Image (tube, grey):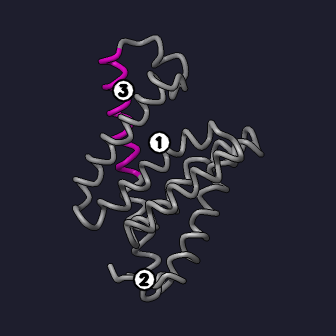
């Protein structure tokens, strides 16, 4: 990846942060419909991390801080699930390959969901996981994470190829 100028870093980071915050906070403003849009907050963070790792970290942190002012639960969910997944997929996909990206992203997502469920008391899959035994919960979280990270990795790779084909990323790559 090319080194990007400070002005481009700030402007691209600001736009991607805005998109991530809008998607992640959608359930707050549109309770039922917003749940459909919330998982898409992974995309701008993954795209930022793909372009430049410090840019990805900046978008991740800035999105979490802004969401903390809007609704703290959405900020926590972003930090431990959707944002963490985007950061790891964007970082690993083109630097380490698809398989390692999916594997490491699945591990991080599983750890994030376990932290949410057992340490912060936010039931990720509702009562199904809080009443289940811990080994079963770990297995379910990891199986879900593998599938979810795989889908996101494939979709992100296709989206980046599309952006490169239409020259939307300009000279950033």
- The first of marks 1 and 2 along the sequence is 2
Structural distance between the alpha carbons of marks 3 and 1: 15 Å
Quarter of the image where the C terminus is located: bottom left
Disc 2: which residue:
4
- Which residue is at the front of the view, 57 or 129? 57
Up the image or down, 100 lies above or below 95; here it is above
Question: Which secondary structure lies at badge 3?
Answer: helix
- The residue drawn where x is 47% and y is 81% is 169
Sequence order check: which comes first, mark 3 or mark 1? 1
Q: Which residues are magenta?
A: 134-151
Main SS of the magenta part reads: helix
Give the labeled residue for mark 1.
81
The residue sitting at 59% across, 43% down in the picture is 75
Image location (x, y in percent) of residue 127: 53, 16
Q: Quadrant of residue 19?
A: bottom right
Marks 2 and 1: in contact by CB < 8 Å? Answer: no
The numbered disc on residue 43 is none
Secondary structure under the numbered disc 2 in the rendered image: loop
For discs 2 and 3, the disc positioned in front in the rendered view: 2
Instruction: Find residue 140 and name its label.
Output: 3
Asked if residue 148 lies in the magenta stretch, the reply is yes
Mark 2 and mark 3: span between their CA atoms?
40 Å
Coordinates of residue 31 in the picture (x, y in percent) = 74, 39
As for residue 40 lying within the magenta part, the answer is: no
């Amino acid at each position: 990846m090319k080194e990007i100028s400070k002005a481009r870093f700030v402007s691209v980071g600001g736009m991607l942060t805005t998109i991530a915050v809008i998607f992640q906070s959608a359930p707050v403003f549109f309770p039922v419909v917003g749940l459909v849009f919330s998982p898409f907050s992974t995309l701008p963070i993954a795209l930022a991390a793909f372009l430049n790792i410090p840019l990805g970290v900046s978008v991740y942190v800035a999105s979490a801080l802004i969401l903390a002012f809007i609704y703290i639960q959405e900020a926590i969910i972003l930090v431990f699930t959707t944002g963490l997944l985007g950061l790891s997929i964007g970082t690993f996909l083109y630097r380490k390959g698809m398989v390692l990206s999916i594997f490491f992203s699945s591990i991080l997502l599983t750890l994030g969901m376990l932290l949410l469920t057992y340490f912060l008391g936010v039931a990720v899959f509702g009562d199904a996981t809080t009443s289940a035994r811990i080994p079963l919960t770990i297995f379910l979280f990891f199986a879900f994470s593998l599938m979810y990270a795989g889908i996101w990795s494939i979709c992100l790779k296709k989206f980046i190829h599309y952006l490169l084909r239409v020259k939307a990323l300009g000279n950033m790559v």
